[in-house]
Image (spheres, rainbow, N blue to C red):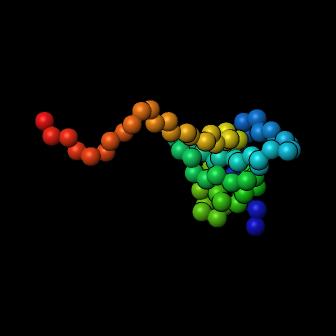
């Protein structure tokens, strides 16, 4: 049962890259809220159809690759309480 959600803005999605981690696609609603993250445009559309989301207007955007955050601790850190 194919439902035509109307015009969906598709930002440049370069999903043809190989040798890298799969590109994740985000489905944003009209207010700019991220509604779903999927591995393909089709997955986003299926999610929208499953929950009867109004997709006028909405957008599909490739999400950036996550960056591994590193925590650097400088010097000795004492966690015990100090009294004044």
State the image quarter where residue 14 is shown: top right
**Residue at horizontal 60 percent and vertical 63 percent from the top:** 51
Q: Which residue lies furthest to the bottom in this view?
A: 1
Along the viewing direction, whichever of 59 and 40 lies nearer the viewer: 40
Tell me: 48 left or right of 19. left
Q: Residue at the spot x=57%, y=51% of the render?
A: 35
Looking at the picture, tell me which residue is in the foreground, 62 or 80: 80
Could you say which is closer to the camera, residue 59 or residue 67? 67
The image shows residue 48 at horizontal and vertical percentages of 64, 57
Q: How many labels does the image show?
A: 0
Above or below: residue 41 compared with residue 12? below
Give left or right: position of 23 versus 18: left
The reply to whether residue 25 is visible in this rendering is yes
Foreground residue among 76 and 59: 76
Identity of the residue furthest to the front in this view: 76
Looking at the image, residue 20 lies above or below residue 38 = above
Q: Quadrant of the C terminus?
A: top left
Q: Position of residue 38 (x, y in %)?
A: 69, 54
Instruction: Identify the residue at horizontal 55%, vertical 39% (top origin).
Output: 70
Residue 79: which quarter of the image?
A: top left
Where residue 69 appears, as percent x and y from the top left, is 56, 40
Quadrant for the N terminus in the image: bottom right
From where the camera sits, is residue 56 visible?
A: no
Residue at 46%, 36% (x, y): give it: 73
Return the x and y of residue 81 as percentages of the image width and height.
22, 44
Q: What is the residue that sits farthest to the top in this orientation? A: 74
């Amino acid at each position: 049962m194919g439902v035509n959600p109307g015009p969906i803005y598709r930002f440049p999605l370069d999903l043809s890259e190989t040798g890298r981690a799969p590109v994740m696609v985000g489905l944003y609603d009209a207010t700019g809220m991220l509604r779903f993250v999927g591995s393909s445009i089709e997955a986003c559309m299926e999610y929208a159809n499953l929950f009867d989301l109004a997709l006028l207007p909405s957008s599909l955007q490739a999400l950036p690759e996550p960056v591994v955050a590193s925590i650097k601790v400088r010097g000795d850190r004492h966690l015990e309480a100090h009294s004044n």
